[in-house]
Structure formats: structure tokens, C-alpha cells
Image: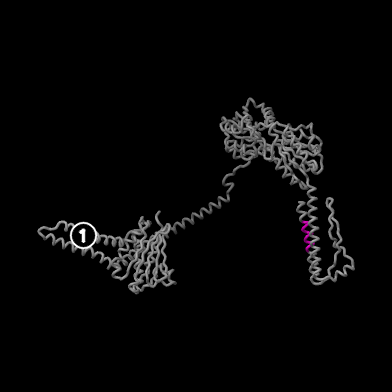
Amino acid sequence: MLKGTTLSICAAFLLRATCDAAELTENTAFGTAPATPTPDFQSLRIKGLTIALPGPQDTIDPDFAGSRAMVTRHSGLATATSHLLIICGALIILCGAINYAMAADAKRVMFLHSFGPQFKPWSDYARAIRAETTRQAKWSIDFSDFSLASARSDDTESEVPLVQYLRALYLKEPLDLIIAVGAPAASFIQRHRSELFSTTPMIFTAVDRRRVDYSQLSENDTVVAVNHDFAAILKTILQVLPDTKTVAIVNGVSPNEEFWHEEIQRQLAPFANRVILKWYDELPFVDILKDAAKLPPHSAILWHLMNVDAAGVSHEENESLNALASIASAPIFSYDGSFFEGALVGGPMFSVMESSAVTANVANRILSGERPGDIKTRPIEFAAPRFDWRQMQHWGISESTLPPGSTVDFREPTVWKRYSWQIALITTIILLQAALIIALIREHRRRQFAEVQSRQRMAELAHVNRFSTAGELTASIAHEINQPLGSILTNAETAKEILKSPSPDIAELNEIVDDILSDDRRANEVIRRMRSLLKKAPFERKKVDLNEVVAETIRFFSALTVSRKFKMANVITPDALPILGDRIQLQQVILNLVMNGIEAMKDAPTENRIISIRTLRVENFAELSVSDRGPGIPEDKLKEVFEPFFTSKAEGMGMGLSIARTIMDAHQGLISGKNRDHGGASFRIRLPLDS
């Protein structure tokens, strides 16, 4: 709060100084003689520091004022700047002085931690006390922290260097208050009170009343004690789990934990005939975990402390408790609320906030000037029992068995109670979505039916297109069939004449028969190709080689090249181009592209009538290009050539390229067209390779 005040004061002074300088600059800029304040310095005293500041109410000597009125505009600006720099420098000194005063007013409080700052349960108390003390304080507090690592063993000689260090550290700047957190810290202070901080106010907190020697307390000491009642804890265990026969007690081997072994044993002695007490303080923690995992039925675990186990290993925070809870075959209870973080069933426990609030209140009373010896507080007892609903469910503990006044934390309300409006909203959304999905499914089916009909009609149109193409190939087909038929006729007539001879040449007859069979196969292959092109078959994708499809299609044009007077330049890649496709439909695409090219070159000179077909492999794609040397496609029509019914021929239907694009879409392929640099058009097909 003081830092904020410091900044506010400095900001206000700086704003005032800036405004005065701006006013002075404006007056001098217009040649107006400003009222000249005297550099009279008022003094500001803060904690022994004196700061001189200009007084705005005084004026300088009249003679000097008269001469001042004669200064030039530049002189006025320089003077204003000089004043501003002087004021800013004074403000910097002022801010530093206020910060110095604030630091000097800060209360110096030291926390002395048992074992270390992260050891449960005292770490939770220290954090809560610090936060609550700061919240209640009316001044700034400078906290420091020291840990008593020597408390992990009974070696008191190792405390001497720490005593000497602390005494030297605070010799010139004594502390305003020491807060000893936990019994080990309290015992350390009482052992060395005469040689360390003998007059410094002291609070012993988070410590049982049995662990403090009240006869050794001075007027500078006060105690915020607690009162452990382990008998009440065991009574609670037997109330919520009446069949309990064994209670395993987790406790360490540090001097503090050894004290509590005897004290717990004394408090639980009346229950010797009721339960068996099993002590874990002679086992390393790893062995404790193994044993806890196989405890007999009707067992419970009482978690006291595990600061140092039998192997000399220290355990901070709640890692060890959480590890035990994850594998234990019995429910876990404890005495302190700092452990109540999900691993415990619960029971009567100390409240961290209650004890910390009392300690913070005592601390602020001492810092306000009260003598610690005059401040008395009652030992803090267990708070009302608390239980973890999740652990109760896990171990089958009924809520009806809990002690009166118990509270159940972490209770999971019913789904409807927790999310009633969310469930209602979700149900409404689901119903709306269901209605929307039904509508979409119906629309999808309608569209699917329409698409099936469209594909059927497109297939029929493609079939018609193939018939149209076949009509244009009639001369080529007739030529291909006539050649083998003519050869068959010639060979048959020759064989007939040989057979008329009295001694026919059997070898020659065999050759003639072989020729007839070969020509028959040629004619049959021509008819087969034509039938496959013209037959009406459903779309079926199979693994084919694009090179083979192209080579087979090229044979259709063998005779057409003569009748239409054009040439074919074919560059087929030697690499296999395996794809998934319908052979007939792919042939139709190639036929359409070639026939379009032939039609486009009908008016070109004979030597320029060349159709180029090229295949190649590009990364994971097979490519086929068909190029001609015709007039090309008008640039403004390139994007329209694949649209239905677009044609540049007077007698064309405009469906060839549209059908080709539809077939490519069905093959997850692409078809594109462009004009060549030296005349003509080029169409490219790109299909994914079959891996």
C-alpha cells in the first residue's frame, strides 16, 4: 500500500511540475513576462532526510524581475526546461526517500520451519499464517524463512553453526517477531533462547501443548498450541467401520515422531482388547507400501507423520501419503486437515485455517506493541469431523454411521441435480438434431437417388457417344476386318488348289492353316475390341495399366489415319502406370480427345495433321496428354469446353468433353486443356497411381 502511495505522490508532483513548465514555456513563447517564482526551497523531512523543494508562493527580487522581463524567447524556453529538470530531480529524490522510509517502517518477521519449508503438516500452516498476517497487517512485513534440517535426527551438536549464523545475521538488524512452526522448531528455540533472540518476541504455533516447556517461557513468548486426541480418532474409526480388527499406524523415526510413538501408544492403550495396533515406524517406506497393499480384511490405517522413514529418507509434501493411498488395501485416517486432499477418509482433524487465523491475530497484536507474555490462547481442539464422500463410496462407509455434526466434502450430486439445465438443453438440442438428421437423411437419399439416375443417364449418354464414335470409326473397323478376312480367303483358295494335286504338300498346307488361324484371331480381336467399346456395362474399377489402355485404343485409329490423312506420334513411357479404372470408359475418354483433335485439324495442311499421344509418370500420378495442331481453343472459351452442350462444331452435340470430365471425376482424376505455344490444343489427364 505504501508503494502505491509513493508512486501516487511522485506522479502528482511530476504532473504539477510538467504543467507549470508548460505554462512557463507558453508565456515565454509569446513574449509574455511570466510571474517569476523565487527559487525559495521548502523542506520536506522524512525519516531524518531533508529534501528542499521550490516554493511557488515567493517572488524574486524586483530588480531581477525587471531585468527578467527583458529576456529573449530562447532564454525563457531554456529557463523553463531548467526548472523542469530541477523539479524532476527533486521528485526522484523524494520517491527514493519515501521508499527508504517505507523500508525502514517494515516489520521483520522470521519463520523457523521444522525440517523444511515443504514438510507436511507445518508447510500448510506456515503459508496460511503468512497470508493471514499480511492480510490483517497495517504495515509492510519483510518475511524471512529458515529451516531446521537438524530436526531430522537427534544430533543437537549440528545446531551450533545455525545458532551462530542466525545470531550474526540479525545482530545489527534485530527481528520484530519469530514464528516457530511445529514442535521441532519450538524445541530448538527453547534450547537456545538465552543465546539466540533472548528479547525478540516469539510465537510457538502448530505445536502440541505437550511439546512445549511452559516453565521455560519468558514474557516475550506466547504459544498457540493444539491438543492431539488420538483416542477420538480411533473411536471414529470404530464407529464408521465397526468390524475393524487391525489399525496400522504410519509414523517416522525422527525425534519428534519417536515422541509421538510413545504418546499415541499411551492414548490408545484402552483399546488394546478391541483392536491390534500395527506399527510401521521400523520399516522403510517402500516396505510400508508393500505391507499396506496386503493388510488383512477389517483393517484401517492411521496416518500420523512420515517425515523420516527407517531408511533415513525424508518425505516432503503429500507424495508419500498419495503413494500409500494408491495401493493400500484399507481406508486411511489422520489427525490434521493438511492431509485431507483426497487420500483420507476423514474424521476429526485440526483445521489449518482456524489455527493459522489465531496465530496471525496474535502476530499482529505483538507487532502492534502488545507483550507476548500477556497474550494467552486456549489449545485448539479437533474441528468437527470431515469426511471425503469419494473415499466413503470406495470403502463402503454409510453416511448414517458418521458422528453427529460431521460434514461430507467432495460429494458428487446426482447427474440431474448437477446438470439439470444442461441436460434439458442437450435433450432439446438432440431432438432438434434428430429432426435435422432425419430431414438430411431424407434429402441425402433423394439426392443419392437423383445422382444414381443422373449417372445412369450419363452412362446411357456415354454409351450413345461411344456408338457415335464407333460410327466415325466405321472405315477403320472395316479396314481392320477386311485385311484378315481377305487373307483368310486367299489362303483358303490356295489350300483348295493344293488339295487338288495328286500329292499335296502337307507342310505348305500346315503353313496356310496357321495363317488362316492367325488372321481369324486378328479379326476376332477387332470384333472383341469393338464389342467391349459398344457394350453397355456398369462402371467397374479394376487394376489396369494405362499404357496398355492407350496402346489398345490407338489400334482403333490404324485405318482412320489413312482415310482422314493424319499421323499419330505416340510416346509411351516404359514405366508401368498401374491405376484403378474402368478400361472401357478410359478408352472412351481417349477416343473423344483424339476424335476432337482429328476434327479440329480437318482444314489444316496434310503435313500438319499430327495427333501426339504421350504417357509419363509424375510422382504418384499417371499422366496422359493428347495434342493436336489445329487452330486451338479461343482463350475466352477455355473454361467452358468441359461444360455440357458446349461445342465449336456446327454438327456437334457438345457432350464429348463433358462426358470425359465426368469419367475423370469418377476416377478421382483431373482433366484439363490448354493451347499449345506453336498452335493447336493439348488436353492432359492425371490419375492417381495404384500403390
Question: Residue shown at 41%/71% (left/top)?
Answer: 678
**Position in image of residue 8 (x %, y %):** 77, 56
**Position in image of residue 101 (x %, y %):** 80, 50
Residue that protrudes farthest toward the top in the picture: 273
Q: Does the rendering let one see residue 450?
A: no
Q: Does the rendering let one see residue 573?
A: yes
- Magenta region's main secondary structure? helix
Q: SS of the residue at dot 1?
A: helix
Q: Quadrant of residue 589?
A: bottom left
**Position in image of residue 264 (x %, y %):** 67, 29
Query: Magenta segment: does it hold 10?
Result: yes
Q: What is the total number of numbered labels drawn onto the structure image?
A: 1
Q: Quadrant of residue 267?
A: top right
Question: Which contiguous range is marked in magenta?
Answer: 8-18
Q: Nearer the viewer, residue 210 or 115?
A: 115
Question: Residue shown at 50%/55% (left/top)?
Answer: 433
Q: Nearer the viewer, residue 147 or 285?
A: 147
Image-based side of 347 in relation to 468, left or right: right
Image-based side of 234 in relation to 75, left or right: left
Q: Quadrant of residue 285?
A: top right
- Mark 1 Cα-neighbour bin, 10 Å: few <14, some 14–19, many ≥20: some
**Position in image of residue 206 (x %, y %):** 72, 37
Query: Magenta segment: does it hold 89?
Result: no
Residue 428 sits above or below residue 271 on the image:
below
Q: How is the image coloured?
A: one colour
Kind of residue indicated by mark 1:
Asp
According to the image, label 1 marks what residue?
515
